[in-house]
Image (cartoon, rainbow, N blue to C red):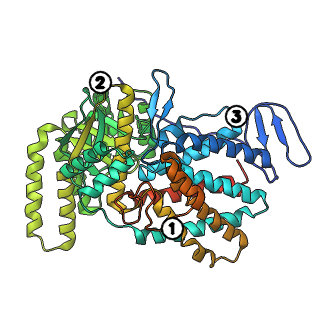
Amino acid sequence: MSLTSFSATFHQTPSFTSLRKRACYCFSRSSLKMSSRNFTVRAGVKRISFDKDCRNGLLVGINKLADAVSVTLGPKGRNVILDGPDIPRVINDGVTIAQAIELADSIENAGAKLIQEVARKTNDSAGDGTTTAIILAREMVRSGLLAVASGANPTSLKKGMDKTVQELVKVLKSKCRPVMGSEDIKAVASISAGNDEFVGNLIAEAIGKIGSDGVISIESSSSIETIIIVEEGMKVDKGYMSPHFINNPDKSIVEFENAKVLVTDQRISSIKEIIPLLEKTAQLSVPLLIIAEDVTTEVLATLIMNKLRGIANVAAIRCPGFGEGKKAILQDIALMTGADFLAGELGLTLEGATSDQLGLAQKIIISSDSTTIVADPTTKAEIRARIAQIKKDLSETDSSYLSKKLSERVAKLSGGVAIIKVGAPTEVELEDRKLRIEDAKNSTFAAMDEGIAPGGGVTFIHLSKYIPAIKDCMEDPDERLGADIISKALLIPAFSIAKSGDVQMFFFFTRKRKIHAGQHLPLYPMYSEESEHVSPTDTVKAQWRVLHMSSFLCIRNSGL
């Protein structure tokens, strides 16, 4: 089997003359229609909609998607059934539901796509909190479009919203607290999984075995039992060089099993240097991970082309670390996989490398910003010996910098990978349980990184108390109106939880529409500022960061 080289010719597409109307555009089929105030242009295969009609269409699409997702929020959130080619899926995960929605009307679908992007960005950033992000986005866009239709300046409106959010994020940082012990981990995980204590205990047990520097991988089990298996492994802070290597689009990751690993600190400047290795792994039908200092544009393009054509199952990442630390990490990876470290300073060239010098990994998971390598079982003894040697070096050093780097290496090598084998009686239950565990895992690691804040929407309600002081610093009335939009949106998540949870809570919020920080809710006393019902601070911040995008597109441009 031979590998093909790749060259590309880029063709410049002509740009369209922009239409100088205060308008928004969506495209479909028909002919030309025009009225004195608002009009729709239908030309060829393109439909262009302006002003009120377009804004209304966008909002209808946003509402349809948000209504479908919002029922899953909170401890009494309900499931949504998604139709599929084989069997229906029972889902409680906001981003999964959002991505499955496609609306017939093109303008409505454009609105839904904007909110899908909000959910995707939130999920990529924090791994959870997508349902709350969608609910917040809907309210901000709805109120913003209403204000613009009433004559507010969209630029000033957006500016006021941004100023308010920036100040609230500062307040949020001061209100969060670190995760303290397994009880906090259990609380975060169970709440993220829909108040499922089994999932909370599962995540707490897994993290207890691998530590905060470990990695959790979720797989399907061949039985109905859910078990935890701990393997030797390492996570490094480098992701794939190109998203074209992704082979699991649902999670936007690269997943390899029983993969070969090339470890070098050299730059790959020509595809000829690694063609023998690529051809050998292609013949064996095994994946190949390339860890190198860098690759040229030509080499990367060739790897991508052969990957897309199915000739070679390959992915590439850059060397993690810096300076001497980089060399040490590469040596650790080589030891873990049983590979030869092809160091340039030792004269070990890539052109002379053979397949025997490649390492072997039981499993590899590559995201946009990290790579997890699960060691081959045959190298466990060598890994433990390396850990012992590093600990010895650690005890003998007086350098605080070197001590820190050695401690990081010990943590990476000893952290390990916890593989949660998820079992369920049916495929429908299995899919739902895996998504819940995935959300719980992401929320827990986010909480350990950034801390936790009161959950159940209480944090948002508490933050709303600071908005009057923020408004006092704004002179533009439209900026102040933007702050009011944020203030109103902050109440919506708790109201949605109350609406889906209990009639008593629903009427409570209908009457009062607000709650003071630390005050207990009538049905769920855990939703107070002093309670153990918590949410990761990183998730809350991620929700606010991505909402800027939706409000910018919908409000400032008066549509799409």
**Vertical placement of residue 382 versus 150, above or below:** above
Residue sitting at the far right: 36
Foreground label between 2 and 3: 3
Disc number for residue 519: none
Measuring 50% from the left and 30% from the top, which residue is drawn there? 82
Distance in Å between CA atoms under marks 2 and 1? 59 Å
- Neighbourhood count class around disc 1 (C-alpha, 10 Å): few under 14, some 14–19, many 20 upward: many
Q: Which residue is mark 1?
A: 463
Which of the labelled discs sits on residue 105, or is there none?
3
Q: Are marks 3 and 1 in contact (CB under 8 Å)?
A: no
Mark 3: give few (<14), some (14-19) or many (20+) Cα within 10 Å: few
Under mark 2, the amino acid is: Gln
Q: Earlier in the sequence, mark 3 or mark 1?
A: 3
Badge 2 or badge 1: first in the primary sequence:
2
Front in this rendered view, residue 510 or 465: 510
Where is the N terminus found, in terms of image quarters? top left
Q: Name the residue at 65% across, 76% down.
A: 474
- Would residue 512 be found to the left or right of residue 173 on screen? right
Residue 340 visible (yes or no)? no
130 horizontally vs 549: left or right: left
- Furthest-top residue in view? 86
Question: Along the horizontal axis of the image, is 119 left or right of 177?
Answer: right
Q: Secondary structure at mark 3?
A: loop
Left or right, residue 520 beside residue 360:
right
Q: Earlier in the sequence, mark 2 or mark 3?
A: 3
Quick one: 60 or 324, which is closer to the camera? 60
Kind of residue at disc 3: Asp
The residue labelled by disc 2 is 283
User: Where is residue 156, by image quadrant?
Assistant: bottom right
Residue 475 appears at what percent x and percent y?
69, 77
| Amino acid type of the residue tagged 1 in the rendering | Leu
Task: Give coordinates of residue 21: x percent, y percent.
Answer: 82, 52
